[in-house]
Image: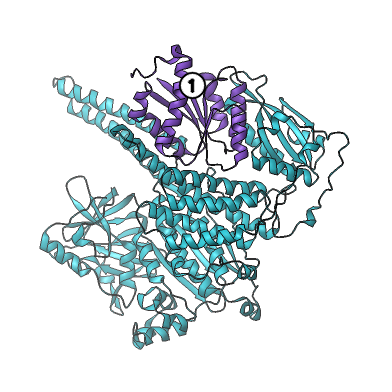
């Protein structure tokens, strides 16, 4: 079972990501998928130390601490320093995205995206971790 | 969108979430714009408010894109560009720009409804607005240059600022504000509230630019934030304002050799809006709804139009009195109610109590089944059952009121939208109008709030269109140049009263009567019989919606018959009072909820009817000897006051058993301040019922609010007291009830539809 943390202040955007990643076709391809939702940066910081995640998906433009600040925090933390991190943002600010990648995010997917695009982006990042650390979440592609 | 049977359902749920979230965002956007409008008029625009507006549109853009609402995404994209220019200080926010933003809010409502497939897509209006937004965006100016380097700031901190935060930092530095670094440690569990408190304390002193988690000293339960704040105040002042055991505040020092940027004086800012820091006075919360029900009365909404001429100069944006606007609906697309979790907890507790009762009943049943006659007497069982029944009834009543409470929302939800309408219409008509709202915290059933928006909008439109005089005319008669519309709401027993009062020209009853006679709505003879109030009520008649009469009476009456009909459907009544030269007041009286009501069951000719208790004053025995006939109406004198009575058996055309009765009763009903006595054969009792709509065959019959099943297979029609009072006490309306008896006699049944 892969665990994905989605950090996004919009409830329906979170529901969208959950629907896509927990749909059988994607989930079975990755040995099952559980989406955990965080509605703010603080919410994410509460959740992160308490569990292991295989992928973190975050928005940038959020109230209080923004996605960039969250990314920096995650990258500095011992716990999730190496967890793959995907930025989803409808920000058309090149600067914001570049900063996110410079802070250690692995990829950027501009919003809006089609379900297929989200699946591809998340799929690639999950496969990368499965290769890097096969013991942590079971053999990739074996199904569940 | 997502294949597979499992995904399908999740996707639908996500889509539902989309509609309710988008609606909430649009509602919030409308409220923020009103505050912004207020700020622009005062020449003091809160950058945080602008950022909130930007964020709402930004989120809408993302969401509509995700859920395939292309046109909405396109509009949001363009709006976002304009708002981005505004928040980055490249575009001035003025009344003309606000016009466009307000237009966008009403377009969003239509786009959402179109997305649901309820209405056609307002393609043309979107195109027009896009064009106007594009023109507005062309008036932007360049941003600022780098002054940030003057400060001794951690490059790590600068690296995580979004473009907007960086802009705010620059803008504050340019205005000569000092920078402060506040380090605070929070408990992760309570950070949201603690941070809100800190923000509130910091707010009077300046602007918070960013919050950065330092990652230092943080275990799993605490977090340290580095907060960057700009302020004019001295470090000691800020230290006093933001105090706490885990707070450290330093001023960020200027790098050596950097000269001070010339501080801009606040007075040097143009009155109409380039962003001025809310340094000294926090913006007034104009309307607050999102927050938990306010304990104190919600502050008044004040909308005064500052410079209508400015709009004329601006773009293709001036909202003309477009036909589309007139058909616009304020109803929202969601049927969602957000509920305070504590209310649900209470309901859950009651469910627990009910479960205990259920167990007790099961145990009792078992005992009764096994009992030998010597062990448990039927009497003991009865006593036990009675006890359980009482407990059960109590919990059920709690449950019922708990659920009703969940359905209740503050009227402010409807009032917020009206404030927008007032702004729009007063700009269309170039009339200055203040909207003063009281009682927006008054709660009413969600369903009613939704249905109420449109009638209220009609009434307010009328008041501005035809009530409030043009500025010159007002000055001429010695009135204040700015007109006032008061929107007052309050609870009165089981009813909610809403008043719409203007200080306009008022209506002349002589002119009304003359027009009614000319229209053939009224004969001269009938006209003589009318009370002033009945004359005023003429404006609610369909015949009064025509242009001709409208002009005669300086226009009042457009669509008011529709208002009356719609309010009537909600079980309410609307009344009107007017004084020439002083103004007009319309009063809506509504039941608090439509869901479950207490009724008085009565019998008429062997049939059961239910009269809502909320409208019942008392029931007395009828003494036929006391009945007098006045103007072809039966009248009783009850405690010195005369009371018209209505014989329901005749009105409903009922015949049959009961004709030879020796005794009957009068149920005295009152709605608003009109009373009527209903003559019935028998008082059966009081009961809580769920009203269901009437079946198809009776749908067109007015005078009944619906029907109800009584639990013992019997069905009772629920009398629409307001409509009956109207029918009996108002002249010149068609008789509409005789058909009921006939229909019932023909089919032998009353059909109850599904709620």
Q: Where is residue B57 shown, x and y percent of the image?
A: 53, 48
Closer to the camera in the image, A114 or B514: A114
Chain letter for the residue marked with disc 1 in the picture: A
Q: Residue furthest right?
A: B257
Residue at the disc numbered 1: A53
The hue used for chain A is: purple
Q: Is residue B627 above or below residue A135?
A: below
Q: Name which residue lies at 30% across and 75% down.
A: B733
Q: Is residue B178 above or below residue B615?
A: above
B204 left or right of B697 in image: right
Q: Where is residue B493 shown, x and y percent of the image?
A: 44, 54
Q: Residue furthest top?
A: A135
Q: Which chain is displayed in cyan in the rendered image? A: B
SS state under label 1: loop
Residue count near mark 1 (Cα–Cα under 10 Å), binned few <14, some 14–19, many ≥20:
many
Query: Which quadrant is the N terminus of chain B positioned in?
Result: top left
Closer to the camera in the image, B291 or A42: A42
A75 left or right of B621 in image: right
The quadrant holding residue B358 is top left
Closer to the camera in the image, B378 or A87: A87
Q: Is residue B449 visible in the rendered structure shown here?
A: no
Q: Where is residue B392 shown, x and y percent of the image?
A: 31, 34
B253 left or right of A105 in image: right
Closer to the camera in the image, B503 or B258: B258
Q: Name which residue lies at 44% across and 18% down.
A: A130
Q: Name which residue lies at 60% across and 60% down.
A: B136
Q: Is residue B679 above or below residue B180?
A: below
Q: Where is residue B418 shown, x and y percent of the image?
A: 51, 60
């Amino acid at each position: 079972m892969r665990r994905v943390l989605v950090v996004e202040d919009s409830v329906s955007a979170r529901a969208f990501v959950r629907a896509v990643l927990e749909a059988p076709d994607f989930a079975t391809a990755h040995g099952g998928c559980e989406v955990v939702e965080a509605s703010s940066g603080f919410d994410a910081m509460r959740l992160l130390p308490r569990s292991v995640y295989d992928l973190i998906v975050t928005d940038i433009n959020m109230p209080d601490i923004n996605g960039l600040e969250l990314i920096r925090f995650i990258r500095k933390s011992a716990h999730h320093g190496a967890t793959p991190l995907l930025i989803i943002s409808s920000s058309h600010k090149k600067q914001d995205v570049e900063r996110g990648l410079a802070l250690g995010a692995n990829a950027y997917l501009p919003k809006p995206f089609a379900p297929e695009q989200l699946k591809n982006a998340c799929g690639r990042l999950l496969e990368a971790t499965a290769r890097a650390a096969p013991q942590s979440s079971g053999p990739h592609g074996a199904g569940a | 969108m997502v294949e597979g049977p499992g995904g399908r359902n999740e996707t639908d749920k996500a889509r539902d979430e989309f509609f309710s979230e988008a609606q909430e965002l649009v509602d919030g956007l409308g409220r923020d714009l009103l505050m912004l409008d207020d700020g622009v008029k005062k020449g003091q625009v809160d950058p945080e408010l602008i950022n909130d507006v930007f964020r709402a549109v930004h989120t809408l853009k993302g969401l509509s894109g995700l859920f395939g609402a292309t046109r909405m995404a396109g509009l949001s994209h363009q709006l976002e560009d304009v708002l981005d220019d505004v928040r980055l200080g490249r575009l001035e926010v003025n009344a003309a720009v606000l016009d466009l933003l307000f237009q966008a809010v009403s377009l969003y409502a239509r786009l959402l409804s179109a997305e649901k497939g309820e209405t056609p897509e307002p393609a043309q209006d979107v195109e027009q607005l896009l064009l106007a937004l594009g023109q507005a965006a062309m008036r932007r100016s360049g941003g600022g240059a780098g002054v940030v380097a003057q400060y001794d700031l951690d490059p790590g901190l600068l690296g995580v600022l979004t473009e907007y935060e960086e802009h705010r930092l620059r803008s504050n530095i340019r205005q000569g504000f000092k920078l402060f670094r506040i380090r605070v440690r929070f408990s992760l569990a309570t950070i949201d509230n603690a941070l809100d408190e800190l923000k509130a304390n910091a707010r009077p002193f300046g602007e918070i630019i960013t919050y950065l988690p330092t990652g230092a000293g943080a275990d799993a339960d605490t977090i340290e934030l580095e907060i960057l704040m700009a302020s004019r105040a001295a470090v000691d002042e800020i230290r006093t304002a933001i105090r706490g055991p885990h707070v450290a505040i330093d001023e960020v020092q200027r790098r050596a050799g950097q000269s001070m940027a010339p501080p801009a004086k606040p007075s040097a800012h143009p009155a109409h809006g380039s962003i001025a820091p809310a340094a000294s006075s926090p913006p007034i919360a104009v309307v607050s709804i999102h927050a938990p029900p306010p304990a104190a009365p919600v502050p008044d909404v004040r909308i005064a139009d500052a410079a209508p001429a400015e709009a004329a100069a601006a773009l293709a944006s001036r909202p003309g009195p477009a036909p589309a606007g007139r058909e616009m609906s304020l109803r929202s697309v969601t049927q969602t109610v957000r509920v305070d979790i504590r209310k649900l907890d209470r309901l859950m507790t009651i469910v627990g109590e009910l479960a205990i009762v259920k167990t007790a009943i099961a145990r009792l049943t078992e005992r009764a089944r096994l009992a030998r006659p010597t062990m448990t007497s039927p009497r003991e069982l009865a006593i036990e059952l009675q006890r359980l029944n009482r407990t059960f009834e109590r919990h059920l009543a709690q449950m019922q009121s708990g659920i009703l409470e969940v359905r209740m929302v503050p009227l402010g939800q409807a009032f917020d939208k009206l404030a927008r309408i007032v702004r729009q219409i007063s700009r269309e008509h170039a009339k200055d109008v203040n909207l003063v709202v009281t009682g927006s915290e008054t709660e009413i059933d969600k369903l009613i709030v939704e249905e109420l928006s449109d009638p209220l909008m009609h009434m307010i439109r009328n008041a501005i269109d035809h009530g409030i005089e043009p500025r010159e005319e007002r000055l001429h008669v010695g009135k204040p140049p700015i007109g006032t519309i008061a929107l007052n709401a309050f609870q009165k027993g089981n009813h909610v009263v809403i008043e719409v009062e203007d200080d306009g020209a008022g209506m002349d009853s002589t002119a009304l009567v003359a027009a009614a006679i000319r229209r053939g709505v009224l004969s001269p003879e009938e006209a003589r019989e009318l009370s002033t109030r009945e004359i005023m009520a003429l404006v609610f008649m369909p015949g009064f919606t025509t242009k001709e009469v409208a002009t005669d009476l300086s226009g009042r009456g457009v669509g008011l018959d529709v208002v009356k009909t719609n309010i009537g459907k909600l079980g309410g009544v609307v009344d009107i009072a007017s004084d020439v030269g002083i103004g007009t007041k319309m009063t809506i009286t509504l039941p608090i909820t439509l869901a479950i009501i207490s009724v008085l069951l009565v019998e008429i000719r062997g049939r059961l009817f239910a009269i809502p208790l909320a409208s019942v004053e008392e029931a007395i025995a009828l003494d036929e000897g006391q009945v007098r006939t006045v103007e072809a109406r039966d009248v009783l004198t009850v405690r010195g006051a005369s009371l018209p009575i209505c014989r329901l058996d005749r009105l409903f055309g009922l015949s049959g058993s009961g004709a030879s009765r020796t005794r009957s009763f009068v149920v005295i009903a009152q709605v608003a301040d009109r009373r009527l006595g209903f003559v019935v054969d028998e008082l059966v009792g009081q009961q809580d019922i769920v009203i269901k709509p009437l079946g198809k065959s009776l749908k067109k019959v007015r005078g009944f609010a619906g029907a109800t099943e009584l639990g013992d297979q019997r069905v009772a029609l629920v009398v629409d007291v307001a409509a009956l009072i109207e029918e009996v006490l108002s002249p010149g309306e068609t008789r509409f009830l005789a058909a009921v008896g006939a229909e019932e006699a023909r089919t032998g049944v009353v059909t109850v539809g599904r709620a």
